[in-house]
Image: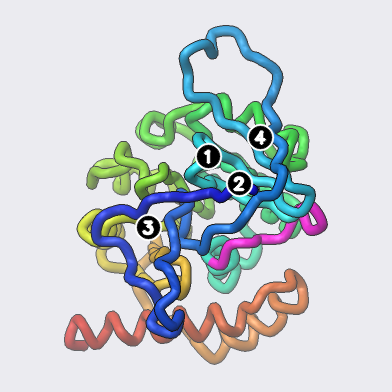
Amino acid sequence: MMEIEAGRPAGGIAPDPDDNGAAAPFFNGNAFLPPRQLAHASILRPPPRPGREGETAPFVMDDGLMRSLHFNPRFVQSEMSIDEPYALKLAYTRQMMAFLLFLPRPRHIVIVGLGGGSLTKFCHRELPRTRVTTVEIDQGVIDCAAFFGIPAEDERMRIVHADAVDYFAAAGEHADLILLDGCDEFGITPAFDSLRFYQNLRDRLRPGGLLVANLIGADAVVERHRRYIMASFDDRVIVQDVPGEGNHLAFAFNEPWRTPDWPALEREARKLALRHGLDFPAFARKLRRGHEQQLRWRGR
């Protein structure tokens, strides 16, 4: 038997009081999850690549049920069910898809962070009229794509090997939606820790576009990034927690702020649930609560 262990960033989310004293969940590079046992796990590696000597190359572990991406045995960066390769296994990835309540027909999505390709695969399959560009800094992660069934690049799907900081700082094509999911084993990628980065993200969005950012890590870090996003998007932001995983999702709107038509969104949520198999009515309720809570905080 081999047990995957992992540490937690300082100031992380406390254990759920309903756990009856169970051990605190561990941080897996994207979320806090309970550890699982991998019996006789096999390790999969992409073919050697020139110039990779001395690099920390990612690898894949496969126990016949789950396939996971690692940089070391202690941290899971991404996870895929063998039987359901397109399923979004982590709650925060499912909840990020709530963008469809506001942007039901995006023409171009940019995803930051490939990992095991969960968001890339889901968006590519579920939104057949949408182009999906995924920006990934680590060539080793890209080399592992075949293990996770990520589609071959074509006119609708491409993977860009680039630092997201440089990618958004440069002039380039605009997007309707940016899904920001760049993490290391301690939380949000440190390179994103600047107001200028989030201002560049907004600059690359079309009018009416949307940023959905996965914020996780130490409380002080999450709060600092929340403030960057609020400042960059003129406070047009809804932030909500993902229970059980320790993630916080920021939905930032690149348009003049107006109160969403919540009854209309709830009707749309029921249609989206049938179309995509996710609990969009719950997503809509959580967003509404988050929006109303933020209005109370502002004293409006």
Number of residue marks: 4
Check if mark 2's residue and mark 1's residue have beta carbons within 8 Å: yes
Q: Residues within 10 Å of mark 4 (few under 14, many from 20)?
A: some
Side of 206 relative to 199 (left or right): right
In this view, 165 is above or below 66: above
Residue at figure coordinates x 27%, y 56% from the top left: 218
Which residue matches tag 1? 73
Residue at figure coordinates x 66%, y 14% from the top left: 48
Callout in the foreground (3, 2): 2
Instruction: Find residue 104 and name its label.
Output: none
Mark earlier in primary sequence (2, 1): 2
Callout in the foreground (2, 1): 2
Mark earlier in primary sequence (2, 4): 2
Q: Residue furthest left?
A: 299
Mark earlier in primary sequence (3, 4): 4
Instruction: Find residue 158 and name its label.
Output: 4
Question: Element at badge 2?
Answer: strand
